[in-house]
Image (cartoon, rainbow, N blue to C red):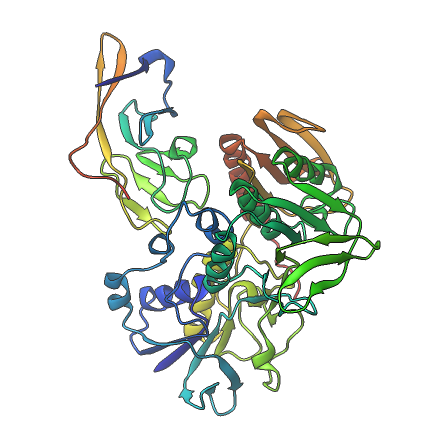
Amino acid sequence: MRTVTIVGASLSGLYAARELRAQGFDGRLVIVGEEPHRPYDRPPLSKDFLTGRTGEDRLALTDAEETAGLDAEWLLGVRARGLDTRGRTVLLDDGRTVSTDGVVIATGATARRLPGDHLTGVHTLRTLDDARALRADLARGPRRVVVIGGGFIGAETASSCARLGHAVTVVEAAPLPLVPQLGPETAAVCAALHRRGGVELITGTGVGGLHGAAAVTGVALSDGRTLPADTVIVGIGAAPATSWLLGSTLALHDGVLCDDGCATALPQVVAVGDVARVGGTRAEHWTSATEQPRVAVTNLLAGRTLATVRTLPYFWSDQYGSRIQFAGHRRDGDTVRLTEGECTDDGPGEAGFLARYERDGRTVAVLGVDRPRAFLRARRELQRDERERAVPAAL
Amino acid sequence: MIPVCRLEDLPEGESVRIDTSPPVAVFRTEDGGLYAIDDTCTHQDASLSEGWLEGCLVECPLHAASFDLRTGEPTCLPARRPVRTHRVTVDDGVVHVHLDAEKGTAA
C-alpha cells in the first residue's frame, strides 16, 4: 500500500494517522478535512469553551512536533464529494482527486437541523465555527435562550448558558431527557439537574417551528405555546456524514457498515468514529473514536480482519457542576440499583451516587454522578468482564 | 512545605487531594512509595487523585490518560503534556508536600 487517504480530520482521523505511522506505514499519507482547522477536541465546545474558561489554543489535539512526525499531506477546508472504489480515487469538492490504495473513512457526523434554522440567532453546536458563533451571540448581553433537545449537547449547552447568566429554557419531546441513554429509572436525575441549575425544562412537547423574519424571535411548541427567544440552540442529535459515499459500492445504513474490525466489504476501505457502524453498532462516543483506529489500521494494512474492536461503551457529560459518567450496555428491563451515595427527586446528593444496571444477576452497565472513583472501579470491572466474555457480535 | 495527613491515614494504594492552587494529588503506592503531582490532568479537567493507581502509574478517571508519578510524564494519549511533580517527606509521622514552583505550571 503506497498511499492511504484518511477522509476526516477530527479525533478518529487523527488517531488513524497516528496508528498508520505507529504500525509502520511509511507511504504517502493524505488527510482530507472539511473544516479549515487542524484536529481539535470537540467535548469542551459545549462546556469550558462556551463559558470562556478554555481558549482555542487548548482545543488542539496535536502540535507542530507531532504533525511534522506524521508527515502527512493535509487537505483542509475541502469536502470529499465521492469515493470511486474501482478507480481507487477520492473525489474532492473543488474538483481535485486523490489517487489512493487505502481509505480510512472518518467523516464523523453532522448536527441535525430544523426547518427555518437559517434565521439569525439559531445555532447548532458541533464544530469550532458553530461554537465561535454561539459564543459571540451570547456575548451580546442577556439573552432569552431556548435549547431544543435535552440530550447531552442540549443539556451541556443549557448549563453553560445558565452559567453565563442567560435565561434558559430546554424543550424536550420525550417525557424525560436522556431516556434512551440512561433508561427511565435514572433519567430523572438529569431533569433534576436542570432545575437545580435554574433552567426551565419543558418535556413531552415537540417544536412546531421557529418564528422570526430575519432574526429568530420565538419557538413555537407543538402544544400551541410560543417561547420568546433571542438565541435558539438546536440540539437534536447528529447524523453520520455518509452522503458523499452515495453511489459508491459501500453499504450504508445509519453509518458505514463494517465488521467487528472496522473493515467494510472492501478490504482497502475501513471506517472509524461516529460515521462507522461497527459490528452492528454506531457509537458517537469519544472513546470509541480513539479506540477503533488501532484495530482499523491493523486490518487495513493486513488487507483482512485480523483484529476486532472490544470497546466498552463509555461516555461522560459535565452539566450544572455535576459529572455524569456511564459505561456498559444498558437495555430496557435491566434492574437498576443504587449501590453508593444517594439520589432523590431533587437530584444527586452532595457525594454523588453510583447506580448499577443488572441483568441475569450480573452488572451490565454502570452510571456514576459525581462519584468518579467508584465509577472508575466499576467501569474497569465491566471492561474485564467484557474481555473475558468476548463473544463475536453479529454484523 | 504543606502538611497533608498522618502517614497511617494514607493507606497503600490510596491517594488524597490537597486544595492548593493548583491542587495537588498525593499517592501512596502499593509498595509504600509516596509521590505528589499536580492533580489536574493536562488533557482536560479531571482530578488525578480520583484516578486508577497501578504501580507508579496513575490513569486519569475521565479519558484514561496515564502519568508516571516519578516523572510526571504522560505514558499514553490523550495527554501530551507532563504534570508537575513535587517532593514528599514524612516528618514525625506526618506526610508533607514541598511544592515545586520552579518548573513552571503544567499548563
On the question of residue A7 being in view, the answer is yes
Q: A85 or A191: nearer the eye?
A: A191
Residue A74: give x, y in percent of width and height: 34, 75
Residue reaching furthest to the left:
B102
Left or right of B94 on screen, residue A145 = right
Q: How many marks?
A: 0
Residue furthest to the right = A223
* Residue B107 figure quarter: top left
Q: Which residue is located at x 58 percent, y 34 percent?
A: A369
In the rendered view, would you say A255 is above or below A144? below
Q: Is residue A169 left or right of residue A140?
A: right
Q: Relative to B52, does residue A167 appear above or below in the rendering? A: below
Q: Is residue A342 shown left or right of residue B22?
A: right
- Give the vertical position of A83 relative to A294 (above or below): below
The quadrant of the image that shows the N terminus of chain A is bottom left
Residue B14 in picture, x, y percent from top left: 39, 24
Q: Position of residue A378 (x, y in %)?
A: 55, 35
Q: Quadrant of residue A317?
A: top right
Q: Is residue A350 above or below residue A255?
A: above
Q: Nearer the viewer, residue A100 or A34?
A: A34
Q: Residue furthest top?
A: B92
Q: Nearer the viewer, residue A235 or A253?
A: A235
Quarter of the C terminus of chain A within the rendering: bottom right
Q: Residue at x 67, y 35 (%)?
A: A195
Residue at 41% across, 73% down? A301
Image location (x, y in percent) of residue A358 = 70, 37
- Let me know if residue A317 appears in the view: no
Residue A42 vs residue B106: left or right? right
